Amino acid sequence: MGNISTSKFFDVIALSRKDRQNNTNMTLLVGEFAHVQGAETLMPSSSAVFYLDFKDLSADVFRAVNPDVVISPAIGTTFDCLELAEFLEKAAFSGRYRVVLDNIPRPDIICREVRHTHPLLNFDVISGKPALTKRMN
């Protein structure tokens, strides 16, 4: 686990979902490392985890990682969940997109906006990192 430098992104070869072991999910954590650090410990032990800063996200890298689940903060320093949802929809992502909400007073507004603008995404929010294990299993 860990972050792979930008120069090595294109050396990443991820097995397709059907080629992975049946019980192994690929989780992509998108965001500044400080915001997503630690989330991997809340994933089921059968999950493989890949960190990626939003500014480094491209269609080629996304296809190489081929995630089953994408997790990000609702609002990052360089992006927000609407921007990532737009990218995922354009990439025809069919997995789950989950946003971690920390100290956001009206998460229903974020849910409503993302679901309205990107209705094809399997989208949900996670209120705080401790609830992540309940939601992701």
Image: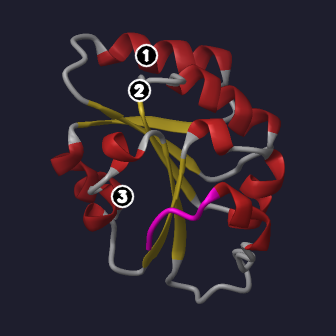
**Distance Cα–Cα, label 3 vs label 1:** 19 Å
Asked if residue 13 is positioned above or below residue 108 in the image, the reply reads below
Mark 2 Cα-neighbour bin, 10 Å: few <14, some 14–19, many ≥20: many
The magenta segment: 1-5
Q: Which image quarter: residue 67? A: bottom right
| Spot occupied by residue 79 in the image (x, y as percentages of width and height) | 54, 24
Q: Earlier in the sequence, mark 3 or mark 1?
A: 1
SS for tag 2?
A: loop
Residue annotated with mark 3: 136
Q: Is residue 3 magenta?
A: yes
Q: Is residue 104 above or below residue 102?
A: above
Q: Is residue 16 magenta?
A: no
First-in-chain label (2 vs 1) = 2
- Magenta stretch, main secondary structure, is loop
Left or right, 76 with reference to 116: left
Residue drawn at point x = 19 percent, y = 21 percent? 103
**CA separation, marks 2 and 1?**
8 Å
Residue that badge 1 annotates: 110
Q: Nearer the viewer, residue 112 or 101?
A: 101
Tell me which residue sits at (25%, 17%) in the image.
104
- Relative to residue 109, is residue 3 depicted above or below? below
- Circle nearer the viewer, 3 or 2: 2
Instruction: Locate residue 88, reporting x and y percent.
Output: 70, 38
Q: Residue at x 51, y 80 (%)?
A: 24
Looking at the image, which is closer to me, 13 or 3?
3
* Neighbourhood count class around disc 1 (C-alpha, 10 Å): few under 14, some 14–19, many 20 upward: some
Q: What residue is disc 2 on?
A: 74
